[in-house]
Amino acid sequence: MKKGIVAIDLGGTTIKCALLSSLGELIEKWEIPTNKSDGGGHIVQDIALTVEEALHRHRWDKQDVLGIGVGAPGAVDKEKGLVLGAVNLGWKGDLPLQIELEKATGLRVEIDNDANCAALGEKWKGAGDGEPNLVCVTLGTGVGGGVIANDRIVHGAGGAAGEIGHMTMIPMGGAPCNCGKTGCLETIASATGIVRIAQEKRAKAVKVESLSPFVMDLSEHDMTSQLVFQYAQQQDDVALEVVQEVSEVLGLALSYIANTLNPTKIVIGGGVSKAGNTLMYPVKTAFQKFAYPNVARTTDLVFAQLGNDAGVYGAGYLLLENSGA
Amino acid sequence: MKKGIVAIDLGGTTIKCALLSSLGELIEKWEIPTNKSDGGGHIVQDIALTVEEALHRHRWDKQDVLGIGVGAPGAVDKEKGLVLGAVNLGWKGDLPLQIELEKATGLRVEIDNDANCAALGEKWKGAGDGEPNLVCVTLGTGVGGGVIANDRIVHGAGGAAGEIGHMTMIPMGGAPCNCGKTGCLETIASATGIVRIAQEKRAKAVKVESLSPFVMDLSEHDMTSQLVFQYAQQQDDVALEVVQEVSEVLGLALSYIANTLNPTKIVIGGGVSKAGNTLMYPVKTAFQKFAYPNVARTTDLVFAQLGNDAGVYGAGYLLLENSGA
């Protein structure tokens, strides 16, 4: 019987690490900085070393461990075990993370991208409650997604399943998106998108000499998505308008996902989700209006529960997913 | 070694039947009428009888047969083997098709709904080419869908996965849909939707005294979706406008599905798909414009290949899907 799993959430700034029992209980959690110098050439050795030290601390032999699961930023080729174009790790080209880390540690390694790991984490230990059909949506600087169908992550033909941030919600005249298109969900429902809409609404409100505290108190440069939701909670007209616009579009986009997959839950996480019910209520209202009635009844919108730990739990689950456990 | 599979596509008018080899080669295909009298109470016995006769004709014993796969109209509860609210079979309430047909024949029975069976059929023997990630869209009187992810049909929490005909494409002021909402994809990209849009465009063109042959030749009541595509192929302005509007919306809806799942192929079937490239070219153009670039590169739009036989092949595949074959 294996004692546990090593789980790694590899980010551009820090590497989050954990030892988990094979049931997913957290045994230890720690972080090391991501050393991007020398073209990211230290990353594999740094992970190998910190894992060795942790196993030593807990007096675990390598045969006690099911392996190492790693969530990596950006696109991942799961079959070849590559992190594709890992520029934010300082790496040029594709990083053969799986095989290099297996060589360095002698342990089995499974990798997937961080959005998929976050979805698996929420399914295993968070809001997903073990449900076999689940979509996770992360509202942060951008909008990301992870899709679980029939109990497994859906990767898609080009590894681009879950690119729900790039659903074109404004087919004509939308704001430009980093992906090269315009009018993507990400230009509306990300923290950045909310700020953009808030600045537009504020400029209009200034012209009509609005007395809304949101307009009076804040300059264009003060805007953050948190402030939008704070003022909306205080029933500020202009802030409420921003939240309403964002929620309508997000609820509509979620209805498209739900009509396609009818997941038991759509789990909403990321920094923007901290707005709580100021966001959730209008999003649910829009979702109920736009989804197919049977879908609206059976797909529930819920908040993520694991915060920044979702990725590390999901990385650990990669070892179980691929053992058929 | 089992010789084959019995496959049944149960419809409101006819019951399509086939004997297939376990590799999916067609051995015999036949039809019987659907007897909806006495509240659909003859259907199970009729199927059992026609199956017995077919096995007899081919001198197959029951132990030569893997079982009977049935595609049924409307919603299906796969776990309980029920056809839910099978009104178009004359049945009141839920028809316990799986258990009744097992009793009547002594054979293993697997059931699923007809849209899912059509998707499985195209995956196994048609345009899907065995791909594990595939979405099938049927453009007929309505718009239906079947989703295959990680090699299995996605049913969804309420059995409503694939309800892509009810994606709300016109959030405000859309035409009413049978589902109770407005602005659904089905109100635009079904045969009925195309006729509705054609009638609207014709009425406008009449007002401006258009000389378009589409307007001059046809009355409001002559409109069919076939005629729209015929005139569009002859570069008729008004007909082209209709096709353009329908294609933009359909391409956008398919981009939502593809951004979520990044399937290898989206297979387009149903009567409307007979329009061929007059439909496919503008739909692909819209899809390329609206999908995430990596998705646009890796998800291909193709036509279905099996026509009305997709359902019967897919029904047969149910026996293999659930054997893990």
Image (tube, coloured by chain):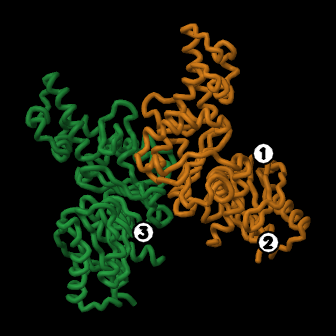
Chain colours: A orange, B green
Camera sees residue A147: yes
The numbered dot on residue B217 is none
Judged from the image, the secondary structure of the residue bearing numbered disc 1 is loop
Dot 3 amino acid type? Lys
Q: Are the residues at dot 1 and dot 2 in contact (C-beta closer than 8 Å)?
A: no
* Image quadrant where residue B194 sits: top left
The answer for which chain carries disc 3 is B
Cα–Cα span, label 3 and label 1: 50 Å
Judged from the image, the secondary structure of the residue bearing numbered disc 3 is loop
The crowd level at tag 2 (other Cα within 10 Å; few <14, some 14-19, many 20+) is some
Judged from the image, the secondary structure of the residue bearing numbered disc 2 is loop
Which residue corresponds to the image point at 56% horizontal and 13% vertical from the top-left? A205
- In the image, B57 versus A277, the foreground residue is A277
* Up-down relation of residue B229 to residue B5 (above or below): above
Q: Are tags 2 and 3 found on a single chain?
A: no
- In the image, A212 versus A170, the foreground residue is A212
| Residue B302 in the image, given as x and y percentages of width and height | 35, 56
The answer for which chain carries disc 2 is A
Which residue corresponds to the image point at 63% horizontal and 51% vertical from the top-left? A115
